[in-house]
Amino acid sequence: MKILSLPMPSAIDSTEQDQEPTAAELNAIAAETPLIEAEVELLDVRIALMDRTPSELDKRRLRKALHRVLTARAALANRAVSGEAA
């Protein structure tokens, strides 16, 4: 039986570990937050509808969540195209 030896990861320098996110990284996170929240809402709706037949209210909630995701994606794409900090 042959034992595979995997390469050991290099030790992380304490200075790398202690660094805070840069302002640009924080701005990128802030710009993507509406899309992430919209995707989580859509996922919540889809999970809720997995085990039942959707009612008209459920269908409306699903359409609204999907619309919110598409709107957030478009806004994020437009910011990237216009050159704003993303």
Image (cartoon, rainbow, N blue to C red):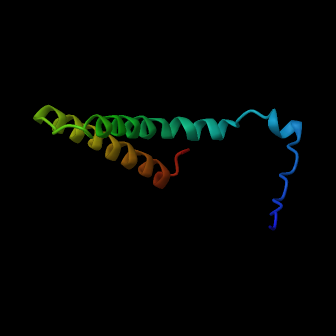
Q: Residue at x 28, y 34 (%)?
A: 48
Q: Position of residue 85 (x, y in %)?
A: 56, 44
Q: Position of residue 15 (x, y in %)?
A: 87, 37
Q: Quadrant of the N terminus?
A: bottom right
Q: Is residue 57 above or below residue 84?
A: above
Give the left or right position of residue 32, taking residue 53 as reference. Answer: right
Give the left or right position of residue 29, taking residue 73 as reference. Answer: right
Q: Residue at x 81, y 32 (%)?
A: 18
Q: Quadrant of residue 60?
A: top left
Q: Position of residue 46 (x, y in %)?
A: 30, 40
Q: Quadrant of residue 19?
A: top right
Give the left or right position of residue 56, taking residue 35 as reference. Answer: left
Q: Quadrant of the C terminus?
A: top right
Q: Position of residue 12 (x, y in %)?
A: 85, 43
Q: Residue at x 14, y 32 (%)?
A: 57
Q: Nearer the viewer, residue 43 or 83?
A: 43
Q: Nearer the viewer, residue 43 or 32?
A: 43
Q: Residue at x 88, y 41 (%)?
A: 13
Q: How many circles with numbers are drawn on the protein?
A: 0
Q: Quadrant of residue 54?
A: top left
Q: Nearer the viewer, residue 33 or 4?
A: 4
